[in-house]
Each structure stands twice: as structure tokens, then as C-alpha cells.
Image: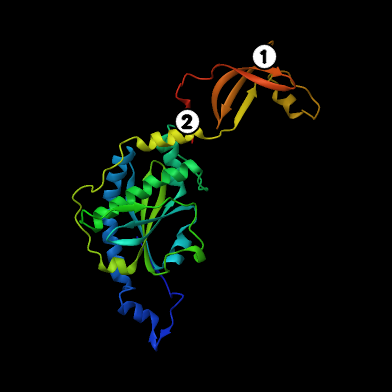
Amino acid sequence: MSAATKDPAPDAQSHGGLDQELLDRMIGAKGDTDVIELSCQNMLAGLCPLLETAFYEATGVQLVARPGDILQGRRRDLLTDLGLNAVYCEARISGWSKDISALCGTQLIIGLVECLLGGSDPDDLSIAARPLSGIELDMSLVVFEQLNESLLDLVTDDPRSKSGVDKPQSEMPPEEDDPRPNFHSAAITIDLEFGAVTAPLTLVLPQALLLKTVLKTPKGRKAALQEKGEWAERLSERVSRSQVDLKAAVALAPLPLGDISRLQPGDLIGFADNGDIEVTLSANGKALYTCALGRAGSRYMVKIERQAGPDENWRSEFS
């Protein structure tokens, strides 16, 4: 685990002859580097096991949560530096803070969607970071919800406190549209392992909040957890409504490799089938149906004849 400080702040200037950094320390807006580091380490130690349990109970998916890096600096600077290939979410815990920001690496979300919808073995995942699709952005909400619920258990024992999470966003708002002040903050990262994928999940919290927070010993979940499988059902419903590109493939007559290497524009290759032409209909790289090739007016069409494979639950393969 490493710690770093990303100051000075944009308003690090004298205030009536008093250095702004010193003033921020005096009023409790900024903490000593070592004090904030220790507070973050203690929070990570309590948060990691809570998050593992909460996520498993909500989804049936086993994650491994390990303490990651700790950074200190201004909120916007930290979010900008850490926001590459990440989805952004704002959250709150009533009675504790309305200024909770979180980032989650997109590779984790992509892998979770693939596996929750039955498409992959977690240990075989090989995922490149990219912007999330609408389905994946929906899925990211469960990560942020369980993170915030776990944080709730750790920072307050007030039964009236509630956790709230806003809709995740593909990127954080521009600075001019950001309603939250650019306060002194700490970025607290959890490295989440899901099969072959490891991705960061980061909380960005005000240092003033960390200085006054006394961590609690959790006594169980304060809010009702989602039923196991609920998220998979919601995603499956979303998948069923999604537009998917279809492809039709026709087998051609086999040719020697030497002949293939000499093919030129205008050469003709026959179909493999004699008589009726058999077409394989696929989507997202998955073979769905075997069809017959036909024609209606000026357009070629395919007629569904049978499933291409034995799996009747092929819808679960889509992400």
C-alpha cells in the first residue's frame, strides 16, 4: 500500500496574512498526512471483509477485496487522476456525509456481466478496459450499493442512518457543473479480484470527515439485502429488450490453401450444399439457429428451421 499527497490546492494562498494550508489544518478541513493515512488504513481493514460478504449475499458472486493505494489531495485532482477506465458514482449516508464519491474499474463490471449472464468462467476472463454499455452501466450500481452499505455499517451505528446511491455515470461531470466543493480529500482504493480480473474500487472522501469519524464494530447488515439472483434477473430482462445485430453465414465449398491464396476479384466459389442452402444465424458470436436460404421479392431472406445447438438457454449468453 502506498500513500501520496497531491497538493498544493488551487486556493493555497494567504488569508489575511495566514497561509491557507495552515488555516485549513486549524479549522479541520485538512489533516496531517500520517493521520489521514492511518485513518484510511483502518477504514480499508474494516471495509474489505464487509464488502466481500455484502456482495456475495446480494449477488451470489464471490469477490476478493484487498486494501489498495491511498492518495491525498484535492477532490477533483484525485478523481481526474483515478477516473481513467472507470465508472463514476456519487453517494451519501444520512447523518454522516453527503459528499461520497466512488470510482470502479470498467474491467470488473464487464467481467461481472459476462459471468452473471452465463457467458464465461471467471477464471478464463481476459478483458480490455473500455466504456461500458447500458447493461453494464446498470450492473455497476450493485457494486456501488454494496460498497456504500458496507461503509454505512462501518461508520455509524445509528439505526436511522440510510445509504443512498445515485445512478452511475460513464464519466464524472465537468468541473463547472460539479455541485460538490473541491475540498481536501483522500482516495481509498480496494483492489477487487474476480476470477482472472483485478480492478480498483475507490472511495474519495473529505479529509474533514475522516478526521472526525470513529469506526464502529459492525453488528450485521442494517438494510435488507437484495435477494440472491435479483440482479441477474434484472439484467436478463434488460438483455431481452436490447437490439442485437444478426449475422447469417453460409458454408462454401472447400478449396485447397494454394487455390485460396490465388483468389482474385471476380472469381466464383460455390456453396457447400447442393439443393437447399443451409444458413447459420448468429449474434454476438453465438450460433442461434439453422435456417434455410430463400427469397421474397428482391430480397434474400432466411427461414428459421431449428436451433443451432443443444442449449435452449442461449439468451443467457448475451452481454
Q: Which mark is residue 7?
A: none
> Residue reaching furthest front?
160
Q: At 28% from the left edge and 69% from the top edge, which residue is drawn?
A: 211
Q: At 42% from the left edge and 46% from the top edge, which residue is drawn?
A: 140
Label 1 amino acid? Answer: Asp
Q: Residue 120, can we see it?
A: no
Please give the residue where the numbered disc 1 appears in the rendered image. 273
Q: Residue 276, can we see it?
A: yes
> Residue reaching furthest bottom?
17
Q: In the rendered image of this protein, does residue 21 appear above or below residue 278?
A: below
Label 2 amino acid? Answer: Glu
Residue 143: x, y in percent?
37, 47
What secondary structure is marked by label 1? loop
Residue 234: x, y in percent?
41, 36
The answer to whether 129 appears left or right of 246 in the picture is left
Q: At 44% from the left edge and 41% from the top edge, which residue is drawn?
A: 111
| Quadrant of image for the N terminus | bottom left
Q: At 26% from the left edge and 43% from the top edge, which residue is drawn?
A: 224
**Disc 2 to disc 1, C-alpha distance:** 29 Å
Residue 210: x, y in percent?
29, 66
Q: In the rendered image of this protein, does residue 305 appear above or below residue 286?
A: above
Please give the residue where the numbered disc 2 appears in the rendered image. 317
Classify mark 1: residues with Cα within 10 Å, few (<14), some (14-19) or many (20+).
few
